[in-house]
Image: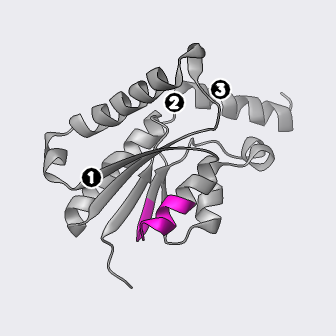
Amino acid sequence: MSTIKMILHPTDFSPHAEYAFQLACSLTRDLDGRLILLHVNPRGFRPNKLTEKEYKKLLWDDLRRLMDADPRLREMPIKTELTEGDPVEEILRVAKDLGCDLIVMGTHGRSGLNRLLMGSVAEAVLRKGPCPVLVVKSPVPLPAEKADVKEELEAVVPA
């Protein structure tokens, strides 16, 4: 097995992504590697009719918040990337262009029918990634996910 030195962590700032971020940081520290923190803004997406400049500032603030959450991160070599486009394509491009050895990303934790019909960024990166991909599921489901699972079950097996 090759040495893991360059770790890519794509984030959408969700709780699942933050859990995966903590694992990516631990691996980076343990392996004495470098971490690339990536957020991909889907082309043309800006919430609440913010200007592009305002939205980018919010995204950079979120990236800084993640990095400031743990004082030990200041000692780690972390590079931040903010791109725009299709999330899967951009994650794969950045991983390839920067020669990443590992991608560590969260999953939204959905399963069954929803995943089958909608697909997911994590699943596509896992299938097409230029390097090993570690998909991390948060240990505690979010309240909204519990409702999603219940709805999926009710759709397949009526009460």
At x 40% / y 71%, what residue is drawn? 101
Highlighted range, magenta? 93-103
Name the quadrant containing residue 66.
Answer: top left
Q: In the rendering, at what x and y percent does residue 44 appear?
A: 65, 31
Name the quadrant containing residue 92.
Answer: bottom right
State the count of labels.
3
- Secondary structure of the residue carrying tag 1 is strand
Residue located beneath label 1 in the image: 78
Residue located beneath label 3 in the image: 147
Residue located beneath label 2 in the image: 142
Could you tell me the amino acid type at mark 1?
Answer: Ile
Q: In the rendering, at what x and y percent does residue 27 appear?
A: 29, 61
- Secondary structure of the residue carrying tag 3 is helix
Task: State whether residue 148 appears in this view.
Answer: yes
Residue 95 counted in the magenta span: yes
Q: Counting other residues with Cα less than 10 Å from the Cα at mark 2, is it few (<14), some (14-19), or many (20 or more)?
A: some
Q: Are marks 1 and 2 in contact (CB under 8 Å)?
A: no
